[in-house]
């Protein structure tokens, strides 16, 4: 089993070491279907946040949100802006660019919009359309520590790749929709274009220099350093999740807030050496604040796990059908991941049998 407490120690140590150069650190967690990457990510996130909440309970009123900093560089300044008629056309086409659903080279575009809780934002979309949108909240009406309450502030946040599954409507528009639906979960059935764009956005926020009203925090604990260096200049970023009941992405399910100092990205293809996926590692590694983990596990173990998961989610009616579904799709994806793992030296391999 994975020692998630040890992982938490390593992540916090990295951020402690990089606090003067990085606003946040990123963790990449990759594994084949059934490897337990989502569970490991959730446990890691929970452990870090619980440790921070314990620190806050012992150090009340320590949080500072610095509002004197200039806003960080425009996170999506280089992207093309859609005109109102282009936005209207996209919405009329059920939030999709009908001619680009399979175009892995399609460059993300942006337009002004509102989040699901009516905050002004810049919305970034690519070939998956609105279902896979990234929303960057405007600086007005920012949340602060007093409004949220200390117990509501989490410094770690999971970013699941699942929210970037192409919608079923999008797959319907593929040249071979039957195969696209059957092989859902393969690399081409994700909006890798916009997920890479999200990584570029996170990298820019990671490189935002921290500041404090004093430098005494530099000799204190990592939690005190974090508490004194929250920045109002870092925007809240809303990303999609995935609703397994609806079998489609859900908008604005997760918020990477100005209080998020550790981002845990988990998914199948984050270390994949093909198309847009191959740029993710270097984009995040260039920040200097990245840890990378690959979960290794025997396929016999994952077959039973995934077959049971398929049965519980209603995708199959028997465990035998679940095994067959695993062998015809999930196993192929798992082997593809192992075959196309990028070749870098700092991938930490961990077992989760």
Image (cartoon, rainbow, N blue to C red):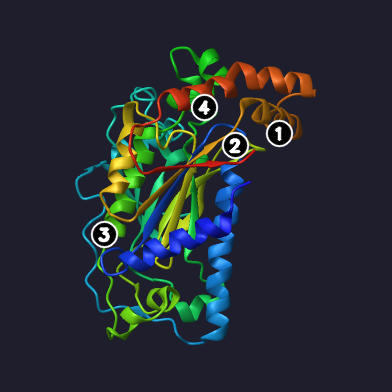
Which of discs 2 and 1 lies nearer the camera? The answer is 2
Q: Which numbered disc, 2 or 3, marks the residue that appears first in the sequence?
A: 2
Mark 4 highlights which residue? 169
Quarter assignment of residue 344? top left
Determine the secondary structure under disc 2.
loop
* Left or right relative to 303: residue 249: left
Whether residue 128 can be seen here? yes
Q: Residues within 10 Å of mark 3 (few under 14, many from 20)?
A: some
Mark 1 highlights which residue? 309
Which of discs 2 and 3 lies nearer the camera? The answer is 2
Determine the secondary structure under disc 1.
helix
The reply to whether callout 2 and callout 3 are in contact (CB within 8 Å) is no
Q: How far apart are the alpha carbons under marks 4 and 1?
A: 24 Å
Residue at 70 percent of width and 33 percent of height: 305
Determine the secondary structure under disc 4.
helix
Mark 2 highlights which residue? 35
Q: Which numbered disc, 4 or 1, marks the residue that appears first in the sequence?
A: 4
Q: How far apart are the alpha carbons under marks 4 and 3?
A: 37 Å
Q: How far apart are the alpha carbons under marks 2 and 3?
A: 31 Å
């Amino acid at each position: 089993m994975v020692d998630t407490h040890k992982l938490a120690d390593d992540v916090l140590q990295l951020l402690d070491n990089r606090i003067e150069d990085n606003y946040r650190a990123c963790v990449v967690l990759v594994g084949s279907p059934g490897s337990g990457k989502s569970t490991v990510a959730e446990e890691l996130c929970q452990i870090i946040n619980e440790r921070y909440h314990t620190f806050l309970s012992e150090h009340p009123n320590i949080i500072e949100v610095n509002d004197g900093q200039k806003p960080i560089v425009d996170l999506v300044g280089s992207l093309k802006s859609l005109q109102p008629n282009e936005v209207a056309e996209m919405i009329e086409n059920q939030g999709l660019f009908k001619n680009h659903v399979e175009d892995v080279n399609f460059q993300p575009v942006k337009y002004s919009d509102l989040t699901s809780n009516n905050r002004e934002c810049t919305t970034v979309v690519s070939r998956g359309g609105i279902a896979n949108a990234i929303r960057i909240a405007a600086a007005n009406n920012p949340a602060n520590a007093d409004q949220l309450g200390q117990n509501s502030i989490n410094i770690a946040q999971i970013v699941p790749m699942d929210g970037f599954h192409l919608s079923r409507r999008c797959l319907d528009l593929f040249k071979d929709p039957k195969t696209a639906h059957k092989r859902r979960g393969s690399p081409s059935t994700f909006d890798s274009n916009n997920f890479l764009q999200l990584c570029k956005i996170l990298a820019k926020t990671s490189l935002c220099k921290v500041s404090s009203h004093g430098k005494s925090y530099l000799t204190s604990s990592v939690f005190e350093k974090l508490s004194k260096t929250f920045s109002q200049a870092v925007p809240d970023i809303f990303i999609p999740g995935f609703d397994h009941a609806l079998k489609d992405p859900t908008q604005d399910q997760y918020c990477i807030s100005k209080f998020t100092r550790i981002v845990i990205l988990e998914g199948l293809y984050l270390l994949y050496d093909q198309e847009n996926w191959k740029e993710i590692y270097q984009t995040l590694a260039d920040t200097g604040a990245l840890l990378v983990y690959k979960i290794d596990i025997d396929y016999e173990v994952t077959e039973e796990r995934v077959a049971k998961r398929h049965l519980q989610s209603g995708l199959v009616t028997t465990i035998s059908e679940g095994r067959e579904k695993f062998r015809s799709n999930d196993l192929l994806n798992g082997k593809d991941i192992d075959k196309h793992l990028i070749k870098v030296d700092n991938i930490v391999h961990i077992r989760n049998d």
